[in-house]
């Protein structure tokens, strides 16, 4: 029975699809090289600038929401005033009062 270990059989042909590592890269991990190149070390000034921009955006959003809330309250107040005025106008509207008695017609 043949051994499964390719080193045991020196006549075994290496897999042509297997990536071959060069001798100078034997102890280098490829992911580490890529991640080190992509890593960006930011200076404290840049961090402060980003923090300042973030707080400005947040404050602008809060101002916008406050303005929207006040606009909604103004509209609601105006509608309540209109409803109160309509109710007052209907209560004070002069009604026609019949003079004399109303007699129902009878079928004769």
Image (cartoon, rainbow, N blue to C red):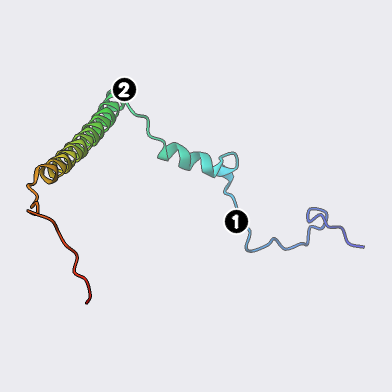
Name the residue at the front extreme.
Answer: 108
Task: Using a 10 Å C-alpha cutoff, classify the residue at mark 2 as few (fewer than 14 neighbours), some (14 to 19) or many (20 or more).
Answer: few
Which is more toward the observer, 103 or 86? Answer: 103
Residue at 60% x, 42% y: name it: 26
Which is more toward the observer, 94 or 45? Answer: 94
Name the residue at the bottom extreme.
Answer: 108
Q: Find residue 81 and report its horizontal and vertical position in percent.
A: 15, 38
Residue at 88% x, 62% y: name it: 2
Q: Find residue 86 and report its horizontal and vertical position in percent.
A: 13, 45
Distance of label 1 from label 2 (alpha carbons): 42 Å
Q: Find residue 96 and report its horizontal and vertical position in percent.
A: 8, 52
Task: Using a 10 Å C-alpha cutoff, classify the residue at mark 1 as few (fewer than 14 neighbours), some (14 to 19) or many (20 or more).
Answer: few
Mark 1 vs 2, N-terminal side:
1
Question: Which picture quadrant has residue 69?
Answer: top left
Q: Find residue 33 and report its horizontal and vertical position in percent.
A: 48, 40
Q: Tell me the residue that label 2 is attached to.
A: 44
Question: Which picture quadrant has residue 45?
Answer: top left
Mark 2 residue element: helix
Which is more toward the observer, 69 or 42? Answer: 69
- Left or right: 90 as drawn, with respect to 27: left
* Quarter containing the C terminus: bottom left
- Left or right: 49 as drawn, with respect to 27: left
User: In this rendering, which labeled residue sits more in front, label 1 or label 2?
Assistant: 2
Residue at 38% x, 34% y: name it: 40
Q: 2 above or below 48? A: below
Q: Tell me the residue that label 1 is attached to.
A: 19
């Amino acid at each position: 029975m043949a051994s499964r270990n390719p080193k045991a059989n020196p006549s075994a042909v290496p897999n042509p699809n297997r990536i071959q590592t060069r001798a100078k890269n034997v102890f280098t991990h490829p992911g580490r090289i890529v991640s080190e190149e992509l890593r960006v070390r930011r200076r404290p000034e840049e961090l402060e600038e980003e923090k300042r921009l973030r707080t400005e955006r947040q404050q602008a959003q809060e101002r916008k929401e406050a303005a929207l809330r006040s606009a909604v309250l103004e509209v609601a107040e105006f509608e309540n005033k209109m409803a109160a005025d309509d109710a007052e106008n209907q209560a004070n509207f002069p009604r026609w009062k019949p003079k004399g008695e109303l007699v129902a017609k009878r079928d004769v």
